[in-house]
Image (tube, rainbow, N blue to C red):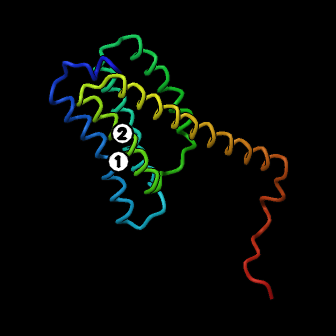
């Protein structure tokens, strides 16, 4: 990552990074305009494509073949975790954009240490969120398996 911020880099690469980062805000606006609670499947696919594209472009700009290999192998794991991923809400999209914006700025400003620190923090936060979501999903499924009759009970909405 530091190598990408040290440059030299091409202006079109920075423009692509900016476009990928801004897509998060576009999705947030679509979500808010639709008054939906979370991104639908199509929108989540767009989000994941742009988010992974942002990271992949940074790695390509760094020109580190080894890290690109690790990232590509990690993508498989991310897809596995993403299978059970719910759509992002507007606040989550805003938070993701707040993570991307300073990374992009550090790269554009030629601040490799800052770019590396910010990206590492962003990746750690994303990983923690995915692992927490997976743990929650696993607990719920375990409860459903152990107590299926509890989950099959009808909800009592009104009492006489």
Q: Secondary structure at mark 1?
A: helix
Looking at the image, which residue is at 23% across and 30% down? 109
Quick check: 133 left or right of 112? right
Looking at the image, which residue is at 39% across and 17% down? 68
Residue 116 screen position, x and y as percent: 39, 25
- The picture quadrant where one finds residue 29 is bottom left
Q: Which mark is residue 100?
A: 2
Label 1 crowd (10 A; few <14 / some 14-19 / many >=20): many
Asked if 108 appears above or below 28 in the picture, the reply is above
Asked if 42 appears above or below 154 in the picture, the reply is above
Which quarter of the image is occupied by the C terminus? bottom right
Residue 110 screen position, x and y as percent: 25, 25
Looking at the image, which residue is at 80% across and 46% down? 145
Label 1, label 2: how many angstroms apart (C-alpha)? 9 Å
Nearer-the-camera pick, 147 or 106:
106
Residue 67 screen position, x and y as percent: 41, 15
Q: Secondary structure at mark 2?
A: helix
- The picture quadrant where one finds residue 32 is bottom left
Q: Which mark is residue 24?
A: 1
């Amino acid at each position: 990552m530091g190598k990408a911020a040290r440059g030299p880099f091409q202006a079109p690469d920075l423009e692509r990074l900016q476009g990928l980062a801004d897509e998060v805000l576009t999705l947030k606006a679509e979500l808010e305009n639709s008054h939906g609670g979370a991104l639908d499947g199509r929108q989540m696919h767009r989000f994941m494509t742009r988010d992974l594209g942002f990271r992949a472009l940074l790695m390509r700009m760094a020109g580190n073949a080894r890290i690109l290999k690790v990232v590509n192998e990690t993508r498989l794991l991310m897809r596995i975790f993403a299978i059970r991923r719910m759509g992002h809400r507007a606040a989550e999209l805003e938070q993701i954009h707040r993570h991307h914006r300073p990374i992009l700025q550090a790269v554009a400003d030629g601040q490799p240490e800052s770019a590396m620190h910010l990206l590492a923090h962003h990746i750690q936060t994303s990983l923690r969120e995915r692992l927490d979501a997976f743990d929650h999903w696993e607990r719920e499924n375990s409860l459903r398996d152990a107590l299926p009759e509890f989950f099959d009970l009808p909800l009592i909405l009104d009492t006489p």
